Image (spheres, rainbow, N blue to C red):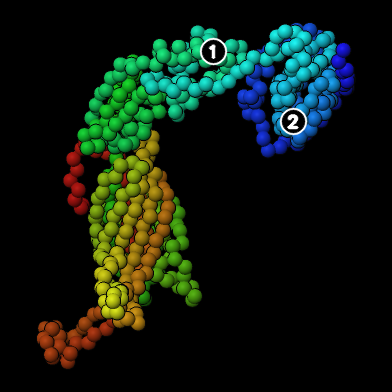
Amino acid sequence: MRALSRLSIRSRKIIAPLCGMILGLMGLAVLAGTGVAEDRLAGASSALRRGLEEKVTLTFRDISTEEALKVLAEQSGISMAVSSNVGGKITLFVTDMTVAVALDIVTEMTDNAYYADGDVILVIGEEDYERETGQSFRIKQSLASFPLSHIPSVEAAAAIRNLNLLTRDGKILGDGKLNNLVIWDVEETHARVALLVAEIDKPRDTVRVVIPLSYMASETMGAAITPHLTEGLGLVEVVGGGTKIAITDLPSKIEALTRMVKDLDVMPRQVLIEVKILQVSRSNEQMSGVNWQVVQEKLNSLSIESAYNVLPKSATGSPSSGTVMTVGDLADDDFNVVVEALSTFGTTDIVSLPHILAVSGLEASIHVGSSEPFITVSTRESQGVINYFETVTTVDVGVKLNIIPTIHPNDFISMDVRPEVSSVSRFVTTATGTTIPVTEESSLATNVSIKSGVYLILGGLMKKEQRDTRTGVPFLRNIPLIKYLFSSKSTKEVTSELVIMIRPRIVSGAEEYELTGE
């Protein structure tokens, strides 16, 4: 008779700290034990069965099996009798696991066995168990991988489940990316699965269709269709120089995929952006800028929404090259009235009337101005000889306008608007004699939402420039050599305020528009 040390412990909960490793699949190496645990618990009382369902957290670092079983009994409140032949050491970290599974893991890792007798779990060596009962304590399970060439692993896994080829504790661990079927079970199951795979993993009839695209980019369409293809079988290709896509899949799925392409390949909604750029020039003696409250009195439909500081004022408190930007909308296309109202603040000129068509959600850019060139000189030494290279570089100045329109329900359009005004203020000469322009810039970024066809007015983008003027006796002041006797030249600083009027309109893209100034 083997000597048994009996552990009878009252229920008490010990919360062990969670350490680095958790057996996520409850230990593939011990799944064999779970397959026979229920048979060994045939003699368990109802109280013992309830105790085996308790959750425990275990942290074992190279401790004896007997000590590990003692801790397990303490946490669960069940009674265990451990044979003197039970040996081995164990290192294990598990959390929130049932006592039954934890007992399987411990006995598996230490080559031991157990069975239930009333309220007690008796733990003995595995060899002792087999010698006394004449049968193995656990069925030996292993992993087997079955690469698939013609059918997706999810379909093969479904066939195995429908045919009940696995034992009670067998598991399917398919790898969808590699299209492998991975089985954890006994050798007999592996043999049955191999026969099934040989039968069903055969070439299947597929259909390939080529669909022309009218609006959506082929790469974008391919990315949208790919998740809906049959796993491991479906294929989408870009053909026809990017104007078509080819879809290969099962006949049962081709119709749905073709319909999806047709639904996605629709004409995008577009926005026709009409821009009017006005310049209000004034001398230093004139007022600091356009008073939009006065303008609003003349244009009852103008709604001033907000004003933003663009550039700080000077140290004296007077406006510098830019002060504020005013945002408002004009419901009626009363352009001439706007020009007349602005003329009361200075000479008003129309700088440009550009139009641009943009797809909803994509950026449109407008540049009205010039590119100022300048030359940079670089040197390079080769075999003791210094070579000089000149490079022409340009800097864009004038008015830049970047707009991202997005169409919303009820014909409203939100616009990410980024206007920028720049000019060359002066030139500097470097030590190498290169003349480089210095620019002044006023810029702002804002987001507004207005109804289609309504004007958005941006004002208050300031710039200063020096203008040379010559006054004198008519006709004589234009005669070479003597013109200096009958005329005088003066430089006058002129401050200009740019007013940008933007009107977005929703269009389908099929209409024809005469993109001319009004």
Figure quadrant of residue 435? bottom left
Q: Is residue 147 left or right of residue 105?
A: left
8, above or below 451, in the image: above
2, above or below 330, in the image: above
Q: Position of residue 127 (x, y in %)?
A: 74, 16
Q: Position of residue 327 (x, y in %)?
A: 40, 54
Amino acid type of disc 2? Ile
Q: Secondary structure at mark 2?
A: strand
Where, quadrant-wise, is the N terminus in this rendering?
top right
Residue 350 can be seen in this image: yes
Residue drawn at x 33%, y 48% as measured from the top left: 363
Figure quadrant of residue 501? bottom left
Q: Is residue 147 left or right of residue 513?
A: right
Q: Foreground residue, 285 or 81?
A: 81
The residue identified by callout 1 is: 189
Figure quadrant of residue 266? top left
Neighbour tally class for label 2: few under 14, some 14-19, many 20 plus, Cα within 10 Å: some
Amino acid type of disc 1? Thr
Residue 53 can be seen in this image: no
Q: Foreground residue, 287 or 16?
A: 16
Q: Secondary structure at mark 1?
A: helix
Q: Position of residue 403 (x, y in %)?
A: 34, 50
Q: Position of residue 291 (x, y in %)?
A: 39, 62
Residue drawn at x 19%, y 50% as measured from the top left: 516
How far apart marks 2 and 1 lie (CA) works out to: 31 Å
Neighbour tally class for label 1: few under 14, some 14-19, many 20 plus, Cα within 10 Å: some
Tell me which label, 2 or 1, sits earlier in the chain.
2
Q: Foreground residue, 422 or 251?
A: 251
The residue identified by callout 2 is: 90
Question: How many numbered marks, from 0 up?
Answer: 2
Q: Foreground residue, 414 or 83?
A: 83
Residue drawn at x 13%, y 83% as measured from the top left: 478
